[in-house]
């Protein structure tokens, strides 16, 4: 029997040998290749000579201009290249609009960036669109769309360095994925010369989020970021090939770029690229370029309280003899030592002599198992940390194995994807007779891992009819996979602009869920990202609040916490945005915006009146002047005319500037409860079927002119 298995394994071993032989013949960099340009390192696949780069697109020029050494790709200046995450830093022009005193007019300096025929694409995760100015409406404009925002200056609240806020001359937006070509662009009707004494220049830049820190001097001088205010750093993703998927790339073994052992193919905003497998580092584009990480040398990232031992791709942490590990600490072991060495050695020898080439495969399987265990440990640890901090636990039944999910999704077959968006893809499958949605992250970054873990921690403690139910999670992948009940009818965002279901009832259901999260759950939970694309609707159009990636538990004795501001522009509480102080009233604000959207069927972000007012302030004006009819959606008028005034008033007080002036979610719930009791609503049925679980957090504005 062992013998027949050996025969089966032989061809595999031979094939493996052939493959490694082919790899060795592929791309190798000659030792004579220059690897530096001034202070900048130029790693393969980039090169300064044609034969030193993987292909012509990766050829760079090192030139000296006015005594300064510059690394250039065509006309683009590069300041840093990272092979670890396939990123490069470029300097690009900032668009600005400055007042010229002698000519008494605004002078535009529009800036173009076009990386279409290069290996680059602007990284959506690492950059922001930044608009500066006191009366500044500016866009980042690409071939088919423009994304922009409006910044104003409100002198009632003092300006602070380090705090970017739309009412204080600064606004920041997320970028869409895969941008290669854009222009900074100003709205010339809105931006007037009247305020040049206050702000001589307006700016719009696409730049590295981490490199931007708002300074009040940006508003008062003609300098921004760079000394001459003309260039900003942008982080690019780069890829070997733009239009090739990993599957396609692997087929051609002569051109496949991931030649190192322990490397694999990944896709990013630019196309396909390579990465060293976890536990390895350095350069996946060079044969043997991925080197084992000695985890034992870094006890901060890889803590080990016992004896640390490095292994290929991983490490072990054990206790010295006579001790065993309990909760990460080595303690004296009282159990008797069992004589085990002899049988183990004996069995190993027997296996080696019989197994032969099969061992290659066994080792591989072993490795897969090990990585799974490693991720499980990491993720489980993170999750427990979160849960322990508020005395709860996650039921074992919620933990699902990767094997089960792979089986259910046919190895995450793209054909079974039913939705996707900003964060990941969603598969619809049947698991244990439930129809479920499986959410899988598209990218692996720490923020994503944290958000997925956070979502498990929050949702595993919540049980409410109007909150999407988390059935389980799989912790064996780097970013955990989440399994939810399947909500069939898409998001409220889709319905808002398509049909007019029973809006007051939906509002009430969302209010119930939020009120429960704020008060009834064991520790208050603030959602932080309430918006129409995060409200799912089931068959009977019952609302389910989803996407708890950025939610926060708030200890009961604290009225609020200071956090990094997260949320979606347009729905974000302006006071939270400004102070960074998160309270339950921040959700109330977002809910108010949602309510206004439900009533008007207009999108807060896109909407602007001729005077430049946004939806919320326009709505408040209309309410105050008794002109609601002009802004309320006609269909809503038909459905709920009786109580419109009351719902509109509720929306207006929810969106008051000061958090103290807004009601609590509980009060909002009661109010809506009363109104809907009067109305006797009957659920309606619609036929739209879409499922975009999380809408990208980007707002698109129509191009003017
Ligand atoms: C580098 O410079 C040479 C000579 O100036 C030019 O012919 C070539 O196109 C440049 N290559 C790149 C990648 O910019
Ligand atoms: C203003 O415009 C004049 C005339 O075109 C030009 O000479 C001057 O340099 C400009 N000033 C600034 C500050 O750009
Ligand atoms: C960007 O560059 C590509 C190739 O260099 C060119 O075909 C395209 O027209 C450019 N786009 C714009 C908007 O200039
Ligand atoms: C912000 O920092 C700049 C110097 O970087 C300083 O001149 C300015 O006064 C500061 N503004 C405030 C409000 O502290
Ligand atoms: C931004 O600047 C402010 C004040 O100048 C400083 O307190 C803050 O730490 C800076 N933030 C970052 C992320 O550098
Ligand atoms: C890549 O695909 C896009 C659209 O699918 C196409 O417009 C473009 O020409 C392709 N580029 C290359 C280099 O093949
Ligand atoms: C594989 O890639 C090499 C190098 O790019 C190319 O010359 C060859 O034609 C490709 N083979 C196939 C089958 O596409
Ligand atoms: C990490 O290692 C250093 C040097 O080996 C040692 O001084 C330090 O105490 C260790 N830290 C922890 C947390 O084990």
Image (spheres, helix red, strand yellow):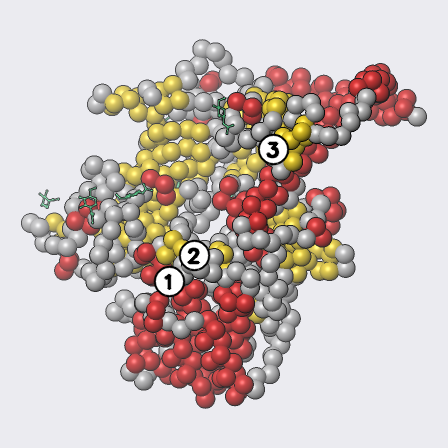
Image position of 76 (left or right of 297): left
What is the CA distance from the residue labelled 2 to the residue labelled 3? 39 Å
What residue is rendered at 41% in x and 15% in y? 34
Mark 2 close to ligand 5, CB under 8 Å: no
What is the CA distance from the residue labelled 3 to the residue labelled 1? 44 Å
**Mark 1 and 2 residues: CB-CB less than 8 Å, in contact?**
yes
**Mark 3 and 1 residues: CB-CB less than 8 Å, in contact?**
no
Name the one closer to the observer, 84 or 94.
84
Q: Position of residue 78 (x, y in %)?
A: 35, 30
Q: Which numbered marker is on residue 654?
A: none
Q: Is residue 580 above or below residue 464?
A: above
Q: Which numbered marker is on residue 573?
A: 1
User: Which residue position holds label 2?
Assistant: 567
Residue situated furthest right in the rendering? 1
Image position of 653 (left or right of 439): left
What residue is rendered at 48% in x and 32% in y? 86
User: Which residue position holds label 3?
Assistant: 329
Label 1 crowding class (10 Å Cα cut-off): few <14, some 14-19, many 20+? many
Quarter of the image that includes the N terminus: top right
Which of discs 2 and 3 lies nearer the camera? The answer is 3
The answer, for residue 637, to whether it is visible in the render is yes
Q: Position of residue 477 (x, y in %)?
A: 63, 41
Which of discs 3 and 1 lies nearer the camera? The answer is 3
Residue situated furthest top in the rendering? 32
Label 2 crowding class (10 Å Cα cut-off): few <14, some 14-19, many 20+? many
Going from N to C along the chain, the mark reached first, 2 or 3, is: 3
């Amino acid at each position: 029997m062992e013998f027949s298995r050996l025969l089966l394994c032989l061809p595999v071993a031979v094939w493996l040998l052939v493959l490694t032989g082919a790899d060795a013949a592929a791309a190798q960099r000659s030792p004579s290749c220059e690897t530096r340009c001034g202070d900048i390192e130029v790693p393969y696949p980039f090169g300064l000579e044609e034969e030193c780069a993987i292909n012509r697109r990766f050829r760079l020029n090192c030139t000296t201009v006015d005594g300064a050494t510059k690394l250039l790709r065509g006309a683009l200046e590069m300041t840093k290249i990272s092979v670890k995450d396939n990123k490069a830093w470029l300097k690009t022009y900032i668009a600005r609009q400055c007042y010229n005193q002698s000519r008494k007019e605004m002078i535009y300096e529009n800036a173009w960036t076009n990386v279409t025929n290069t290996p680059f694409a602007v990284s959506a995760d690492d950059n922001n669109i930044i608009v500066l100015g006191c009366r500044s409406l500016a866009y980042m404009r690409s071939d088919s769309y423009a994304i922009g925002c409006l910044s104003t200056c409100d002198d009632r609240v003092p300006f602070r360095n380090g705090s970017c806020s739309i009412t204080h001359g600064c606004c920041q937006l997320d970028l869409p994925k895969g941008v290669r070509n854009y222009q900074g662009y100003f709205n010339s009707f809105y931006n007037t010369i009247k305020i040049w004494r206050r702000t001589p220049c307006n700016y719009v830049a696409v730049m590295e989020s981490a490199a931007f820190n708002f300074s009040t001097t940006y508003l008062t001088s003609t300098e921004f970021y760079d000394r001459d205010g003309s260039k900003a750093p942008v982080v690019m993703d780069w890829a070997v090939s733009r239009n090739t998927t990993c599957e396609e790339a692997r087929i051609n073994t002569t051109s496949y770029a991931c030649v190192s052992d322990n490397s694999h193919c990944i896709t990013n905003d630019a196309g396909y690229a390579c990465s060293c497998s976890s536990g390895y580092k350095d350069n996946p584009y060079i044969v043997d370029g991925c080197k084992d990480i000695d985890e034992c040398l870094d006890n901060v990232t890889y803590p080990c309280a016992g004896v640390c031992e490095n292994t290929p791709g991983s490490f072990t942490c054990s206790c010295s003899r006579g001790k065993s590990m309990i909760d990460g600490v080595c303690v004296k072991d009282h159990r008797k030592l069992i004589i085990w060495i002899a049988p183990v050695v004996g069995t190993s020898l027997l296996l080696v002599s019989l197994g032969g080439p099969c061992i290659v495969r066994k080792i591989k399987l072993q490795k897969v198992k090990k990585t799974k265990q490693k991720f499980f440990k990491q993720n489980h640890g993170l999750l427990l940390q979160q849960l322990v901090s508020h005395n709860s636990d996650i039921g074992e039944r919620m933990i699902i194995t990767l094997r089960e999910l792979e089986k259910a999704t046919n190895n995450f077959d793209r054909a079974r994807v039913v939705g996707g968006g900003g964060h990941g893809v969603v598969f619809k499958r049947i698991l244990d007779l439930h129809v479920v949605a499986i959410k899988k992250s598209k990218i692996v970054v720490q923020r994503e891992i944290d958000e997925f873990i956070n979502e498990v921690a929050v949702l595993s403690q919540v049980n409410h009819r109007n909150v999407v139910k988390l059935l389980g999670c799989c912790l064996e992948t780097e970013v955990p996979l989440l399994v939810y009940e399947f909500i069939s009818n898409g998001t409220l965002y889709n319905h808002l602009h398509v049909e007019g279901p029973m809006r007051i009832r939906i509002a009430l259901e969302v209010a119930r869920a939020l009120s429960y999260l704020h008060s009834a759950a064991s520790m208050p939970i603030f959602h932080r990202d309430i918006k129409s694309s995060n409200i799912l609707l089931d068959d009977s159009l019952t609302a389910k609040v989803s996407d708890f990636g950025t939610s926060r538990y708030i200890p009961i004795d604290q009225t609020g916490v200071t956090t990094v501001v997260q949320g979606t522009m347009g729905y974000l509480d302006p006071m939270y945005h400004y102070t960074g102080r998160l309270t339950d009233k921040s959700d109330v604000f977002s809910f108010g915006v949602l309510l206004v959207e439900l009533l008007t069927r207009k999108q807060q972000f896109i909407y602007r009146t001729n005077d430049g007012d946004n939806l919320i302030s326009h709505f408040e004006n209309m309410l105050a002047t008794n002109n609601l009819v002009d802004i309320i959606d006609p269909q809503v008028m038909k459905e709920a005319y009786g109580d419109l005034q009351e719902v509109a008033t509720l929306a207006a007080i929810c969106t008051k500037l000061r958090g103290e002036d807004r009601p609590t979610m509980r009060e909002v719930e009661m109010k809506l409860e009363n109104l809907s009791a009067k109305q006797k609503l009957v659920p309606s049925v619609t036929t739209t079927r879409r499922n975009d679980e999380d809408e990208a957090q980007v707002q698109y504005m129509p191009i003017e002119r």
